[in-house]
Image (cartoon, rainbow, N blue to C red):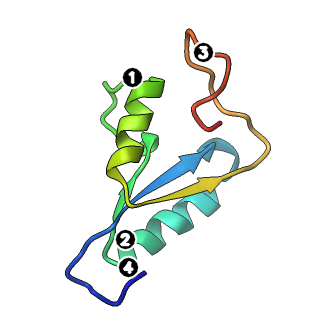
Amino acid sequence: MANDRSHKYQIFIGGTRRDLPEVYDRILTAILEAGQIPSGMELWASGIEPTKETVLNHLRDCDMHVILLGGRYGDIPDGSDVSNTE
């Protein structure tokens, strides 16, 4: 990350948190300790439906994207043949 602390980066954390909770939490903590803004489906309000469009809109607003790949594929939304993680 740049040395300019006046800019806050929004960092999207993507992946299947259920199989990598400790890794997810460490990444989230590192982002917060660096003074940056984490984003990810687990951090959204409970009423937000994670559609492909919603995920893409959040990704467009982010400066960086960290993806966690583990043993789980991720939930496949209705009307799709791939998971949001993919």
Percent coordinates x, y for residue 74 in the rendering: 66, 32
Residue type at mark 2 is Leu
The residue where tag 4 is placed is 34
Is residue 52 visible from the viewing direction of this image? yes
Percent coordinates x, y for residue 44 in the rendering: 34, 39
Q: How far apart are marks 1 and 2 (CA)?
A: 25 Å
Q: Residue at x 65, y 36 (%)?
A: 86
- Between disc 2 and disc 3, the foreground one is 3
The disc at residue 32 is 2
| 19 to the left or right of 54 | right
Is the residue marked by circle 2 packed among few (<14), some (14-19), or many (20+) residues within 10 Å? few
Question: Given contact means CB atoms under 8 Å apart, are the residues at marks 2 and 4 in contact?
Answer: yes
Residue type at mark 1 is Glu
The residue where tag 1 is placed is 49
Percent coordinates x, y for residue 24 in the rendering: 57, 58
* Residue closest to the far left: 6
Q: Does 47 sit above or below residue 42?
A: above
